[in-house]
Image: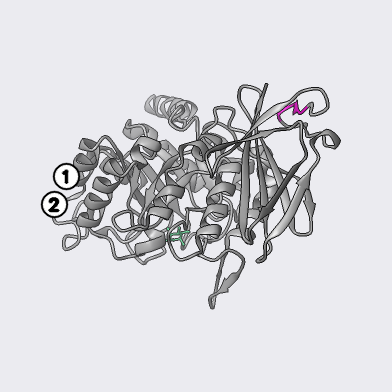
Amino acid sequence: MKIIPLLLAGVCCLSAHAQKFDGLDLTPQMGWNSWNKFQCDVSEELVRETADAMATNGMKDAGYQYINLDDCWQGQRDAQGFIQPDPARFPSGLKALADYVHAKGLKFGIYSDAGAQTCGGKPASRGHEYQDAQTYAQWGVDYLKYDWCGCEDLSAKGAYTTMRDALHAAGRPVVFSLCEWGNNTPWLWAGSVGNSWRTTTDITPCFDCVLNHPTWHQWGVLQILDAQKPLRPYAGPGHWNDPDMLEVGNGMSVNEDRAHFSMWCMLAAPLISGNDLRHMSPQTLEILANKEVIAVNQDKLGVEGFVYSTNDNVEVWFKPLSGDRWAMCVLNRNPAAKKISFDWKKEKVADGFSKRDTQFDTTTYALRNLWSKTDAGDTGKTLAAEVPGHDVLLLRLDKQ
Ligand code: GLA
């Protein structure tokens, strides 16, 4: 009889101390994930070659660090229930693969699902959460994307909290990336559960479209962007809205890729590249590794941008940056080019959320064009520009 209170005390204290790993992503996560380009066609060669590419092509130097294996790495569970990688695709095992990625100075991530099977029909973590978390820790996993297929009868907060606690109990710091597509308003409860949460259905490499499937749909860049607009107050250092992984280099035009990347930077979104890093065009690499644009995403304030004005389907976004600076992004949603003009003296940007405002009437800001990497005058003179269709003008404003 004496045992019961002791056991209860144990349960109480374990859960009271369980928490997510803090401090791992004070700025949005940056990395690569296999899904957007390769879906289930993953292998240890792909992961090794991608790590080689990231370590040497300028991306690591620009801040990318996670190499994340998405769905379909799984084989079967062994007799004791421990998950094994697919032996044909990962003959060396995931511990060896994580070691390889770590030796490149990068971090290794994987994927599972809160249900019995992943979206790709592989064994998932339901009922094996603590066992899987322990296995990941033994392998050296640094990042877990946790999906939501087959979970209709589960509480999202409950299921994700169970995995958070399992990861914490396993002891190895892991970025925990929630992926329930925004179905259960994770922005309202996931700040203490995970490091980021998906806010929408899956992205598709299309600037402005909806791709319908029999039971679900995918969204283009603009559709996803519009769904982020009300979610700004919920994100910040260590707890980010995730509008899904990047499609840069996966088939949109260079203008559209540039606009997509710029907007994900304005949103302080995780920057998880989703293309083939081993074979990409110089233009794709130039977009992904533009340090001045990435600095907008990685700014330590961690405040998302917002739409300041809309005219003729052209949106002017502002994002407060540290050090009395701002980023401004003029997004032309039209397929055709548009001429814009912005008379600074007549504008006042006031952001109640970050408690920041501009004083264009009394203060001059120097302008830096972040894509052309050139100085672009200052706010003393009306801005006049032509923005190509499905493209952006991205400026940084530095208070003089
Ligand atoms: C879901 C996720 C995707 C990807 C696939 C894998 O659709 O939203 O990002 O992980 O599952 O099957």
Residue 156 is labelled as none
Does residue 380 appear to the left or right of 222 in the view shown? right
Foreground pick, 142 / 223: 223
Which residue is tagged 2?
92
Q: Quadrant of the N terminus?
A: top left
Q: Is residue 390 above or below residue 191?
A: below
- Give the structural element (helix, strand or loop) at label 2: loop
The residue type indicated by label 2 comes to Ser
Task: Look at mark 1 in the image and give the residue it sits on.
Answer: 96
Neighbour tally class for label 2: few under 14, some 14-19, many 20 plus, Cα within 10 Å: few
Determine if residue 77 is in view: no
The location of residue 281, given as percent across then percent down, is 37, 57
> Secondary structure of the magenta portion, mostly?
loop
Query: Which span is picked out in magenta?
Result: 354-358
Give the residue at x 68% y 21%.
400
Tag 2–tag 1 contact (CB < 8 Å) = yes
Q: Is residue 243 left or right of residue 47?
A: right
Residue at the outermost left position: 92
